[in-house]
Amino acid sequence: MKINVKNIVIVFFLISLIVLPSISSAQLKTDKLEGTNLSQTFFGCGTTSKATCIVENILKFILALAFFVAAVYIVISGYRMVVSSGNEEAVTAAKKNLYWALAGIIVIALSWAILTFVVDIAINAKPG
């Protein structure tokens, strides 16, 4: 029985679509959502609807999605290593994919840190 990697990725994606909204909605305070606008409810910006808050949340969502994709690539690379059956070319290709997926996770983590740092400076900076 041959397992198709594409089907595994689709299953993980569908599971994440089902699970992630329930995790994020568990953090909402529904008693205070009446009479609020989109930036307060959807982006979680509270009473401040500054553009920095909205942009920060959108970029953090994109980075979280990229992290998920990199994690899937790590799983796929590991699967290809196991299934390579001693084929050196397949093992080398899987190691290369694993290396680049780990490099991607490092870049994503650094981007997240830089984004947080820049947004903190932008929000807390005093005009001049």
Image (spheres, rainbow, N blue to C red):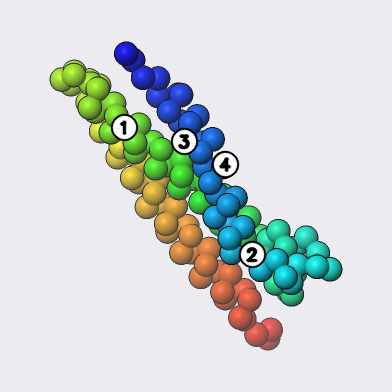
How crowded pointer 1 is (Cα within 10 Å; few <14, some 14-19, many 20+) is rated as many
The structure residue drawn at horizontal position 46% and vertical position 40%, both measured from the top left corner, is 69
Circle 3 or circle 1, nearest the eye: 3
Residue 80: x and y in percent read: 29, 26
Q: Amino acid at mark 3?
A: Phe
Residue that badge 4 annotates: 17
Say above or below: 76 vs 121: above
Residue that badge 1 annotates: 77
Q: Visible in this render: residue 59?
A: no
Residue that badge 3 annotates: 12
Callout count: 4
Q: Quadrant of the C terminus?
A: bottom right
- Secondary structure at numbered mark 1: helix
How crowded pointer 4 is (Cα within 10 Å; few <14, some 14-19, many 20+) is rated as few
Q: Amino acid at mark 1?
A: Ser
The structure residue drawn at horizontal position 53% and vertical position 63%, both measured from the top left corner, is 115
Between discs 4 and 1, the one toward the N terminus: 4
Q: Quadrant of residue 96?
A: top left
Q: Are marks 2 and 4 in contact (CB under 8 Å)?
A: no
Between discs 2 and 4, the one toward the N terminus: 4
In space, the residues marked 3 and 1 are separated at their CA atoms by: 15 Å
Viewer-nearest residue: 13 or 118: 13
Residue that badge 2 annotates: 28
- Secondary structure at numbered mark 2: loop
Between discs 3 and 1, the one toward the N terminus: 3
Q: Are marks 3 and 4 in contact (CB under 8 Å)?
A: no
- Secondary structure at numbered mark 3: helix
Viewer-nearest residue: 26 or 53: 26
